[in-house]
Amino acid sequence: MIKKQEDSNKNISTRLLDDEPVGMTVQVVRVMGDGAFRQRLLEMGFVRGAKVTVLKNAPLQDPVEYMIMGSHISLRHSEAAQVEVTDKDAEFCDMEDAFNGIVETEVAGVDPMADNVLRVVLVGNPNCGKTSLFNNVTGAKEKVGNYGGVTVDSKEGWFSIGGRKVQLVDLPGTYSLTEYSPEEMYVRTYIRDNHPDAILNIVDAGNLERNLYLTTQIMDMNIPMVVALNMWDELEKSGDKLDIEMMSRLLGARMVPLTAYNGHGVKDVLQATMAAIDESEQETMHHNVNYGPLIEDSLKELGEMCPELDRYTVLKIIENDQHAIELLNNKDDAETVKSRATELRQLIERDFNSDIVSIITDLKYGFVRGALAEALTPNPNRATGETKPGYSMDRLLTNRWLALPILLVLMWLMFEMTFTLGAYPQDWIESGIGWIGEWIGKAMPDGILKDLVIDGIIGGVGGVLVFLPQILILFFCISLLEDSGYMARAAFIVDRIMHRVGLHGKSFIPYLIGFGCGVPAIMATRTLENRRDRLVTILTVPFMSCSARLPAYLLLVAAFFTANQGLILMSIYLIGILIAALTAILLSKTILKHDKTQFVMELPPYRKPTARNATLHMWSKGKQYLQKMATIILAASIIVWALGYFPRHEGQTPQEQIENSYMGQMGKAIEPLVEPLGFNWQMGVSVLTGAAAKEIVVSTMGVLYTGESDATEESTSLKEKLQSATKPNGEHVFDPIVAYSFMLFILLYFPCIAALAAIKREAGWKWVAFEVVYTTGVAWLVSFIFYQIARMV
Ligand code: GDP
Ligand code: MG
């Protein structure tokens, strides 16, 4: 029994987990430290008596991969040094003793028709298959990510069953319902504020010990719950046997096997959920974890003092959870309740001779283990410390010598594929647009309207549309990396480097998404638990070259570099990464000083990515891109065209017309500013308009250079127009140096409006202002230095 820990601790010698060699299996004695870090380790299963195996060091020696409760967790050395362990056979605590079964509480019936809609929420650990089930049930085109917390916002969908319409909500993945991460707080507040009719708790059946920990917290919320045992296919393959009926009885919860990604069992899960809702209309017995007499009495006493709170919240108040305690504030006797809660907490801590967080976590895990000991028969052929199937690829992909080269090759492949494979459909789209332009040119009478359609709309939007194939390919690749589980490995591999610049390996994921689009990337920083880390990542993500900048690079690279096009493109991306790193270091040393960042992270098993998910993902991104084009880019193209078209003067050459237009005047006004970078006023204008969305840089050039092509030359493509563009003195406007300086500027300056909107939402106006000034300043400086030096040599 946990109570005895002091006496038994005297008989065992403890060491630090960090000092254990690879291959060693040990037993956890306690986790030192405090706050979020300690809580997270406890939740991940680092509780008294849990067996941990040291699996491997990351290729750069830090962090380290451990196996605990069958799942793979990575910790930095500094974190592993916070865990006290002892020999794996040392007898000092028997977790199963903590199993006291369940207690039943009477819950008054609810009228589900109170608000006319039935609402069911999906709650579960990251990567347990919530989104897969959501997609299967609602048919929604939702992203399925294999990285903790990809689904950060909740997604809503609908389905019908037995003539009733039900709203299904996909909540972010979470390991627990404490107060330490935005996901946890989100799920917690969502459930409290929205009172769903039922909770559908998705668990990974192959990892029940850890997954059911969350279940024990949900049980306390006294909301009808069904547990879907997902990944049932994997459990069957592993050779473990689970007695579902016994398990349901021990936990007092309905359990239904499910294989979400192929739809097996979906119907049963939904029917069980509806049955749970129907049952809740009558007064029912609700099942909760039995924490033993002392805590149960405390819960009862405090529960009677605040009858409006559920058992979960009352327990949280005893646990000294600040968010739960805040809920007391509008009570008259808040102070009495608070001080009684403190007394009870001290009483419990004294009795168990431990701190409240450990006590409750231990008891919950003890409950889960006790139930599993009865109902789960592990495959007798698997030894302790042996990994489950699904991890064998780690031998190669996180191999000490091969991991980094493979990571680099994968990234290079991704960008090379984008460049070469995308060229074919690009050609088709290009000729299609040319054909449409020609056809309209013949069909429409001359005049402003025809100029608007051909030069403004087709010229502007068409110039961006041709890059759709590349963008689709890029998102397809990113989606494959996410779904397969490789993204978490990438974080594991690069953490040491990210740590150098003061960040967490997890920041790697937003950065990688940033190559697609800064907006989802900025949103993905929500997986970072530490606000400082989030801010630094948010502010540096825009330096990752997003796909909207790609059209400009592709145009310039194709026009002015004949050899090594892939390498030139890659160098731009690398410079973006470098500037991001320098910025992160700078921020960490100045306005956003470090507190300790942690690296606790789960490495999910490798799973075969499905073409369906990758295609859905690609399509939803493509749709967003097209929508952006249909709205912002179309509007901006027309504005840009109009600024270049007016005021009209009779008898001007097209070149003079543009030069004297509003646009030309604006460009000329900023020309002295951009001249030291090698730019002319047309490029200055493109940069101005590109602030709305970076694709517009190209469409602006498309409009600006329409009138400039040599009249005798039949040059139709923008590329040829740029190649032949000349200054008044006859020199070419562009050469490789100017083109590269221009690409650098496009890479670094002002993130687009949409990205700023995302930054505003995540960090506030102050940081938006900072970002605008900082990025544009850096862009100017880098282009200036490059151009001046390159001209000299
Ligand atoms: P979420 O993070 O909880 O939303 O989980 P996802 O729905 O994104 O799924 C994570 C991964 O598990 C994806 O690669 C899915 O294809 C995979 N997956 C989902 N359900 C199952 C299942 O029943 N069996 C197996 N083998 N894989 C699944
Ligand atoms: Mg999800």
Image: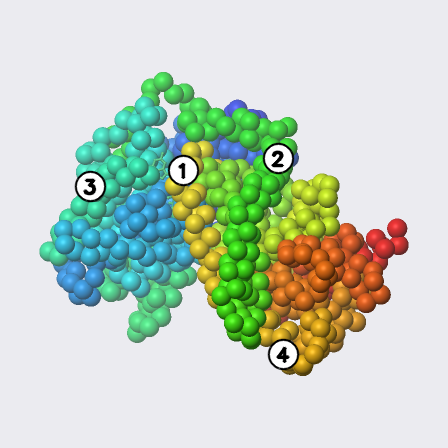
Image height check: is 742 above or below 422? below
Q: Name the residue carrying label 2.
A: 409
Does label 2 or label 1 sit earlier along the sequence?
A: 2
> Residue 77 placed where, x, y %?
59, 38
Rendering quarter of residue 340: bottom left
Residue drawn at x 58%, y 50% as measured from the top left: 515
Q: Label for residue 646? A: 4
Residue lying at the far left of the rendered structure: 282
Q: Is residue 67 visible?
A: yes
Does label 4 or label 3 sit earlier along the sequence?
A: 3
Q: Nearer the viewer, residue 242 or 564?
A: 564
Q: Is residue 2 left or right of residue 596?
A: left
Query: Do the residues bearing badges 1 and 3 touch, measured as CB atoms within 8 Å?
Result: no
Q: Name the residue carrying label 1.
A: 610
The residues bearing labels 2 and 1 have C-alpha atoms spaced at a distance of 22 Å
The residues bearing labels 1 and 4 have C-alpha atoms spaced at a distance of 52 Å
